[in-house]
């Protein structure tokens, strides 16, 4: 089963890191998808010619990089959103959160109206149904809200579902990165734009269902501008 | 010195991961920049109320996340490009490299002409000088080239230096991500666009020096289109 993992002895970096790199390469070369079961540590240790302790250490490193997921008693699996960690671009290290929020919105305003237009052109009915489901879920969260934080991850998923309507596989990966702002908005704002969010989300959904790229782009721009105005006033 | 690290005992996740999170939080809260020296493991162990073994394990996790750098005999330091690992968005896991290259260029064509226009408006003389230096460096690499791979990282730095002319701190972080394609182009292409690269880079530099946003945007679009045409023909 494991045929491409080369003998690792005789190199300078810590064995556990080399083993981690090789395991990562194995997943990529074999195109193992999210949830695929990995060979057990005996097999990996034998194939990589290292001890089981090294494999365990390598697997821990890969868990911390969100490449693997260990399910106790069941085995080791390829993680969902493989290789993407929280805040993968280290935005938290930039400091000045108000400025960060404005910077993120500047980029969202450039990308998301365009993404909405692409989505209107390229969406399948199945993908559109997912957008509708996510949009409704945001409304449910806004209405049921016990505390603000519930609504923001649902909002992020709505924006991801729109990017997932395009033929570009990078866009739905990029959206969670540039909507990192959801972590910040909760911290920085008190007044929320509940009704405006519901209204502008609905406009976006209608434009997508009508497969109207211009309207989708305009509605997304309007939606983001309202948030951007709030942010500028912080 | 360490005042915000809370007592960690009595929680469920592995201690080393909790300790890693707390050390990360410490760096962010204290706004420690790249290269800042960390407290030694005795101090960290005492403050977090865990053993030195746990601290060492936590530090290893943070090295693998590119948050810390261990310099043997000197101590532990905050890493450059803190928290950003190679391929942070896991593009390598998507498969189909030709498609990936086209998808990345679609996004570059949306963002980089706009970035060039912002750069023309916002660049300081110091930042412009860095763009010129990076642009010249690309030409040196193209002329001296022993093998293709030398020129692509220099090209990537040129594009990053333009993004660094804008007031938006996220853009120069995003460029290396969406120019991940440099890893792919070398693998997938044989014919390179040496003279076209030199000519269109020069046009971009001239527009930036003239602080002409429209020309900068146009020149960047022309530059990327030439590459995009090559990619579409693969």
Image (tube, coloured by chain):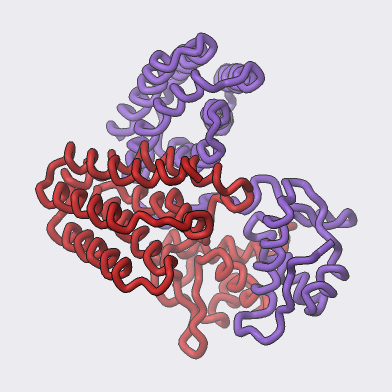
Chain colours: A red, B purple
Q: Residue at x 61, y 73 (%)?
A: A60
Residue B152 appears in the figure: no
> Residue A65, how many percent across, how many down?
56, 64
Please tell me in which quadrant of the rendered image residue B110 appears: top left
Instruction: Name the residue at 71% across, 84% down.
Output: B9
Residue A129 shows in the view = yes
Residue furthest to the left: A210
Taking A190 as reference, is A95 left or right? right
Vertical position of residue B19 compared to residue B195: above or below: below
Q: Position of residue A9 (x, y in %)?
A: 69, 64
Left or right: B113 as drawn, with respect to A86: left
A228 lies left or right of B61: left
Q: Looking at the image, which is closer to me, A202 or B179?
A: A202
Residue at x 45% of width, y 71% of height: A78
Q: Residue furthest bottom?
A: A73
Q: Position of residue A177 (x, y in %)?
A: 45, 52
In this view, the residue in front, A123 or B181, is A123
User: Relative to B172, does residue A81 appear above or below in the rendering?
Assistant: below
Q: Please give the count of numbered marks on the rendered protein.
A: 0
Q: Quadrant of residue A124?
A: bottom left
What's the residue at 25%, 57% (across, down)?
A198
Question: For the N terminus of chain A, which image quadrant?
Answer: bottom left
Name the residue at the right extreme: B73
Image height of A190 relative to A38, above or below = above
Residue A155 point in image, percent of width and height: 34, 59
- Give the quarter of the image for residue B60: bottom right
């Amino acid at each position: 089963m494991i045929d491409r993992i080369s003998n690792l002895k005789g190199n300078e970096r810590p064995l556990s890191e080399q083993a981690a790199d090789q395991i990562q390469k194995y997943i990529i070369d074999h195109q193992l998808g999210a949830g695929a079961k990995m060979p057990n540590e005996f097999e990996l240790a034998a194939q990589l010619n290292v001890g089981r302790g090294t494999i365990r250490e390598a697997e821990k490193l890969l868990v911390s990089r969100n490449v693997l997921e260990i399910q106790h008693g069941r085995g080791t699996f390829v993680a969902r959103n493989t290789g993407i960690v929280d805040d993968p671009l280290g935005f938290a290290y930039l400091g000045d959160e108000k400025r960060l929020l404005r910077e993120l919105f500047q980029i969202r305003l450039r990308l998301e109206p365009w993404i909405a237009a692409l989505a209107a052109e390229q969406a399948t009915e199945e993908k559109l149904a997912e957008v509708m489901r996510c949009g409704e879920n945001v409304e449910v969260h806004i209405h049921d809200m016990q505390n603000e934080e519930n609504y923001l991850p649902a909002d992020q998923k709505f924006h991801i579902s729109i990017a997932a309507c395009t033929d570009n596989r990078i866009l739905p990966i990029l959206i969670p990165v540039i909507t990192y702002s959801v972590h910040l908005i909760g911290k920085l704002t008190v007044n929320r734009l509940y009704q405006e969010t519901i209204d502008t989300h609905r406009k976006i959904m209608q434009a997508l269902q009508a497969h109207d790229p211009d309207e989708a782009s305009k509605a997304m721009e309007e939606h983001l501008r309202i948030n951007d105005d709030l942010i500028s006033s912080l």
